[in-house]
Image (cartoon, rainbow, N blue to C red):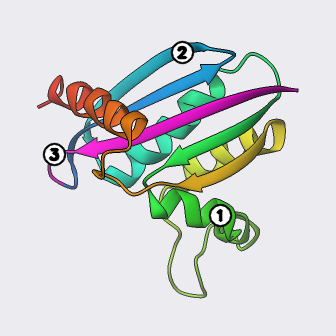
């Protein structure tokens, strides 16, 4: 399996509001930047979109080292929350619905194709790739402001 590094970030001006996401994929010394956004969204949706679109860009199953500053995304994947929510019919518990089930469903399917190692990085702390993804996400969000 090819080994790929994926760096992601999401941004939102207002929550909800115009949002954007950015991703950098690195394989064998080559890099690819991706970004996009929506006019009316949330920060968590943009964080999820960054990971989803990055994984969807891979043309074959890969070993992925994912780096994200989103504790929502990292914890839900690493600690199995998202799989639990899906198994419970997209409920967090008996009375609270899980948010963003459409995106979680897509992401969980992608995690069945790729071997994903999830790594949390502190946001806005000088991590070069995270800062780059943040700039991509903010620029994408500005197109919808």
User: Quick one: SS at disc 1?
Assistant: helix
User: In terms of sequence position, does the residue under pointer 1 or pointer 3 come before the other?
Assistant: 3
Tag 2 residue:
31
Tag 3 residue:
13
Q: Please state which of residues 1 and 73 is positioned toward the viewer in this rendering.
A: 1
Residue found at x 28% / y 43%: 11
Residue found at x 21% / y 26%: 139
Q: Mark 2 and mark 3 in contact (Cβ < 8 Å)?
A: no
Mark 3 closeness class: few <14, some 14–19, many ≥20 residues within 10 Å: some
Q: Please state which of residues 19 and 123 is positioned toward the viewer in this rendering.
A: 123
Residue found at x 46% / y 38%: 8
Mark 1 closeness class: few <14, some 14–19, many ≥20 residues within 10 Å: many
Mark 2 closeness class: few <14, some 14–19, many ≥20 residues within 10 Å: few
Span colored in magenta: 1-14
56 over 116 or under it: above or below: above
Residue 37 position in % (x across, y down)? 32, 30
Tell me the quadrant of the picture where the N terminus can be found.
top right
> Residue 119 colored magenta?
no
Q: Residue furthest bottom?
A: 94
Tag 1 residue:
82
Residue 118 position in % (x across, y down)? 64, 52
User: In terms of sequence position, does the residue under pointer 3 or pointer 2 come before the other?
Assistant: 3
Tell me the quadrant of the picture where the C terminus can be found.
top left
72 over 55 or under it: above or below: below
Q: Residue furthest left?
A: 145
Q: Mark 3 and mark 1 in contact (Cβ < 8 Å)?
A: no
Residue 109 position in % (x across, y down)? 75, 43
Residue 117 tag number: none
Please tell me in which quadrant of the rendered image residue 137 appears.
top left
């Amino acid at each position: 399996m090819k080994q790929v590094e994926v760096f992601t970030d999401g941004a939102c001006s207002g929550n909800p509001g115009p949002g954007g996401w950015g991703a950098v994929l690195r394989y064998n010394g080559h890099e690819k930047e991706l970004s996009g956004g929506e006019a009316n969204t949330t920060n968590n949706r943009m964080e999820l979109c960054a990971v989803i679109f990055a994984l969807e860009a891979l043309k074959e199953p890969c070993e992925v080292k994912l780096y994200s500053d989103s504790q929502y995304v990292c914890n839900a994947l690493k600690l199995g929350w998202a799989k639990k929510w899906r198994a419970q019919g997209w409920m967090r518990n008996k009375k609270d619905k899980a948010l963003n089930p459409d995106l979680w469903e897509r992401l969980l399917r992608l995690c069945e194709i790729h071997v994903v190692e999830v790594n949390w990085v502190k946001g806005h702390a000088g991590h070069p790739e995270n800062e780059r993804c943040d700039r991509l996400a903010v620029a994408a969000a500005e197109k919808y402001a």
